[in-house]
Amino acid sequence: MNIQHFNDKGFIGNFLFIIIITLVIGIGLFIWTKNKNPLYSLSNNKLLSEINLKSSEIREENKLLLELFFSDKYHSCLQIEEREIEVVKNNLQDKIHQVLIELINGPSDNFVETIPSGTKIRSVYVDQGNIVYLDFSQEIVQEHPGGSWAEVVTIYSIVNTITKNFSSIKEVKLLINGTERETLCGHISLRRIFSYLPLTCDY
């Protein structure tokens, strides 16, 4: 009777051992088959593609296609240079500030800069009437070449660039060192508020 009892226990132990081994082998085969399965790989690749697409869409939202107004090489009118930039911050005033930096950096095509190198933007403020106040450093005056047409080109390269790239902005007020100035260099009054003026050439 005891011998039979031990035989039964040995049989049950062997049976459980076989079941465990079978389960381990089965799980291993399932994992191996899943990883080798082309449909599973395709599913993973599809998920990766969706992630990459969403990342690409986010990057696209952070890009801004600009129309920057520079002087033509004959100093007779303004010309548009298109430029794509990465937006650093998303609020309107920071975007305007970033666009002005691109304008001050000058053209990359066969055009001529309109704002003296070294000029800085001291502040940008948009009021409730969507008038933007742009405060420039003294260099815009001190380093300016002078002349009435050169003043027109400087002023409207700024005004046209801002109003063209930001549809909510229709008018621009220019300040120098935080104060209203009579003129830029003796010709064009800065006491007024400026709006878009078409000064581009068709050639």
Image: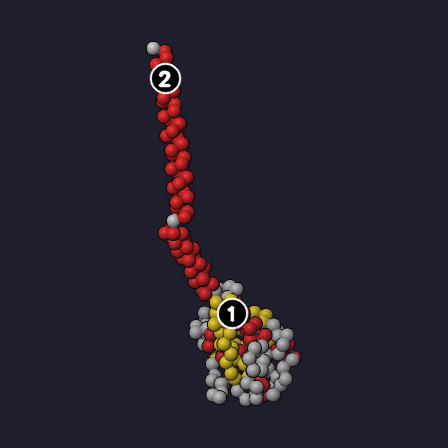
**Residue 55 or residue 61, whichever sits in front:** 55
- Residue 85 is labelled as 1
Q: Is residue 42 left or right of residue 181?
A: left
**Residue 41 or residue 148, whichever sits in front:** 41
Cα distance in 3D space between marks 2 and 1: 81 Å
Q: Dot 1: within a 10 Å radius of its alpha carbon, few (fewer than 14), some, or many (20 or more) residues? A: few
Quick one: label 2 or label 1, which is nearer the N terminus? Answer: 2
Horizontal and vertical percent position of residue 123 = 56, 69
Task: Name the residue located 43 percent from the left edge and 72 percent from the top edge.
Answer: 168
Q: Label 2: state its secondary structure.
A: helix
Horizontal and vertical percent position of residue 19 = 37, 30
Q: What type is the residue that disc 2 sits on?
A: Asn
**Residue 14 or residue 124, whichever sits in front:** 14
**Residue 128 or residue 101, whichever sits in front:** 101
Let me know if residue 99 appears in the view. yes
Q: In this rendering, is residue 178 above or below 21?
A: below
Residue 144, quarter of the rendered image: bottom right
- What residue sits right under mark 2 in the picture? 7
